[in-house]
Image (spheres, rainbow, N blue to C red):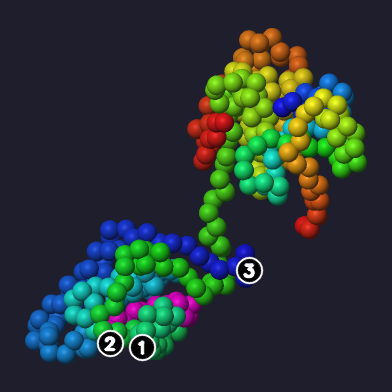
């Protein structure tokens, strides 16, 4: 969606973590071979290859490497290779936000090197690295909004709660009314066992169930239950359903609410 | 609930709802009816001795 921030969190896989650690180890070996380890910590340079990585992976990788750099040698630089300007902007913003000196250099048509230089060991938490987001929007990128929830309300009785059935009926009526007032309506309302009475003629909840159905909520009543109570002819809202559908709706829900 | 019983027995319009958040933050039930029905409702409740805690008019503004 144009104009929206492309935003998502990135959980580290072990392979990615290993990649960063491997580079740290390589750098440590390089320093050991050249005998420079410990001479001038500011010279410690670790390289991250984030070419081909979509936002926010370059930022995540760089943060992880900055953290490793701090643990290894304190001050130093992390050079990150990226293949798009968005990543350059995001890395620059991240580095400057952490008080680092940031320089970038274009190496080729689709290759940049961003150098983040820390004058002291940086405090980078795992949570911070893992929750890195793209601050600069990626043109044309899909927005990473979470998948919509599929809320299913399972009404199994005319009463809400136990203790006093008169009160329980009032509470259930209030609950169903309250469903109609929610910003996010449930995807489905299932009525079974005693709950089947609520979708039949004479029910005080009919008006609200009809309102929900008119708003696109699937209102399903158990056919076996209607037959059992002898009220199949009085169903007044929604559809009759069977246990296969009930089982599918319940298991396919992201959230089942049973008042 | 006695309000509901009173109104239903007298054939007065309205319905029971949870007390709207605009009125009170707590938990409770309220009788919802049109503001024009106020006088008739008050008379019925007085006649039946149903205590009234509060009456509130909520104006719903369409802003979408």
Q: Are marks 1 and 2 in contact (CB under 8 Å)?
A: yes
Q: Residue at x 15, y 77 (%)?
A: A28
Q: Chain of mark 1?
A: A
Q: Residue B54: where, in percent of width, then height?
A: 75, 41
Q: Alpha-carbon distance for marks 1 and 2?
A: 8 Å
Q: Which element type, helix, strand or loop, lies under badge 3?
A: loop
Left or right of A206 in this view: A167: left
Q: Residue at x 69, y 9 (%)?
A: A230
Mark 3 is surrounded, within 10 Å at the Cα level, by few (under 14), some (14 to 19) or many (20 or more) other residues, namely few
Q: Are marks 3 and 1 in contact (CB under 8 Å)?
A: no
- Disc 2 with disc 3 on a shared chain: yes
Query: Picture quarter containing residue B32?
Result: top right
Q: Which element type, helix, strand or loop, lies under badge 1?
A: strand
Q: Which residue is mark 1?
A: A101
- Residue A112 seen in render: no
Q: Which residue is mark 3?
A: A2
- Disc 1 with disc 2 on a shared chain: yes
Q: Are marks 2 and 3 in contact (CB under 8 Å)?
A: no
Select label 3 or label 1 by which is in front.
Answer: 1
Of the residues under marks 3 and 1, which one precedes in the sequence? Answer: 3
Mark 2 is surrounded, within 10 Å at the Cα level, by few (under 14), some (14 to 19) or many (20 or more) other residues, namely some
Q: In which quadrant will I find the C terminus of chain B?
A: bottom right
- Range shown magenta: A77-91
Q: Which residue is mark 2?
A: A119
Decide which of A131, A1 is in the foreground and name it.
Answer: A131
Q: Residue A215: where, in percent of width, then height?
A: 73, 40
Of the residues under marks 2 and 3, which one precedes in the sequence? Answer: 3
Query: Picture quarter containing residue A60?
Result: bottom left
Q: Residue at x 21, y 89 (%)?
A: A43
């Amino acid at each position: 969606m144009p104009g929206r921030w492309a935003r998502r969190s990135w959980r580290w896989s072990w392979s990615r973590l290993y990649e960063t650690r491997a580079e740290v180890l390589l750098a440590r070996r390089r320093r050991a071979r050249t005998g420079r380890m410990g001479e001038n910590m500011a010279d410690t340079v670790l390289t991250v290859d984030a070419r081909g990585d979509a936002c926010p992976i370059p930022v995540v990788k760089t943060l992880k490497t900055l953290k490793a750099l701090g643990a290894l040698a304190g001050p130093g630089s992390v050079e990150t290779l990226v293949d798009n300007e968005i990543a350059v902007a995001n890395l620059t913003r991240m580095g400057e936000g952490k008080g680092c000196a940031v320089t970038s250099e274009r190496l080729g048509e689709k290759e940049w090197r961003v150098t983040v230089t820390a004058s002291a060991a940086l405090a980078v938490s795992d949570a911070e690295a893992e929750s890195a987001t793209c601050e600069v929007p990626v043109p044309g990128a899909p927005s990473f909004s979470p998948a919509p929830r599929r809320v299913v309300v399972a009404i199994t009785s005319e009463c809400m709660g136990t203790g006093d059935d008169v009160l329980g009926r009032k509470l259930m009526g209030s609950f169903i009314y309250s469903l109609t007032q929610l910003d996010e309506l449930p995807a489905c309302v299932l009525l079974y066992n005693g709950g089947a009475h609520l979708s039949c003629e004479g029910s005080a909840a009919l008006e609200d169930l009809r309102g929900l159905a008119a708003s696109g909520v699937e209102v399903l009543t158990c056919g076996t239950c209607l037959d059992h109570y002898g009220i199949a002819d009085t169903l007044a809202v929604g559809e009759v359903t069977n246990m296969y559908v009930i089982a599918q709706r319940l298991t396919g829900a992201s959230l089942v609410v049973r008042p | 609930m006695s309000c509901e019983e009173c109104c239903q027995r007298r054939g007065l319009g309205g319905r029971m709802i949870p007390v709207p958040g605009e009125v009170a933050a707590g938990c409770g039930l309220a009788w919802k009816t049109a503001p024009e029905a106020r006088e008739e409702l008050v008379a019925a409740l007085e006649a039946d001795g149903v205590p009234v805690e509060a009456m509130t008019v909520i104006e719903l503004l369409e802003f979408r």
